[in-house]
Image (cartoon, rainbow, N blue to C red):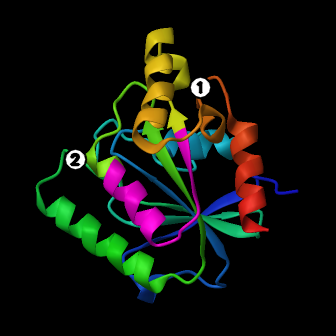
Amino acid sequence: MINFANATFVKSVASDMDFPSPRLWEVLFLGRSNVGKSSIINALCNKKSLAFVSKNPGHTTLLNYYLIDDKFYLVDAPGYGFSSRDKNHYKLFASLMDNYFVRSDKLRFAIVLLDIRRRINDDDKLMIDYLVSNHISYRLVFTKYDQANQQEKAKAKKMLMDIYNIDKNDVIFTSSKDKVGLEVLKETIEKAIK
């Protein structure tokens, strides 16, 4: 059993030269800017400020490593898509992630976060297609479930069937505020790193 509350920030990484030691399995969190990655990480680990929550999209620019219960690293990737930063941010993101995917031999699983109130866009599709084509195991996780009305929830579930032929039972619906779906997410991660 993994104690997610036993979580510590290790370091921010710009390249494979900076990967933390010892090398452990890694679970990568991906998602658009402002999807709520930091909030979900904090809720998952039951810590209010483990990951910095910014009001400005695109704040995270490096890979942030968190050691979870001395068993694996949770890796928070920069958000893709819209950023309050300049266009160089997109190039830096692409370079950073290309380097990570090529160099990291410890990536075990990826969590792709999607805002339940937003449509899956081209950036989301590119990321998911990349994971599929490179045989990287992943799970789709909707965030901000508490902020969506019934129509938005129904649309999100239908969208998964229309775009990816994914059953709603294969997706985790979460809320960092109401703690919805966090236990299922923990179980999913635990199974992935065993």
Q: Mark 2 and mark 1: span between their CA atoms?
A: 24 Å
Residue 133 inside the magenta-drawn segment: yes
Q: Secondary structure at mark 1?
A: loop
Counting from the top left corner in percent of width and height, residue 108 is at 62, 70
Q: For this rendering, which residue is in front, 26 or 84?
A: 26
Q: Is residue 134 above or below residue 148?
A: below
The residue at which mark 2 appears reads as 83
Q: For this rendering, which residue is in front, 162 or 19?
A: 162
Residue 59 seen by the camera = no
Identify the magenta region: 125-141
Relative placement, left or right, of 23 versus 60 is: right
Q: Which mark is residue 158?
A: none
Relative placement, left or right, of 176 versus 79 is: right
Residue 42 seen by the camera = yes
The residue at which mark 1 appears reads as 177
Residue at 47%, 63% in the rendered image: 132
Residue at 43%, 17% in the rendered image: 152
- Amino acid carrying mark 2 in the image: Ser
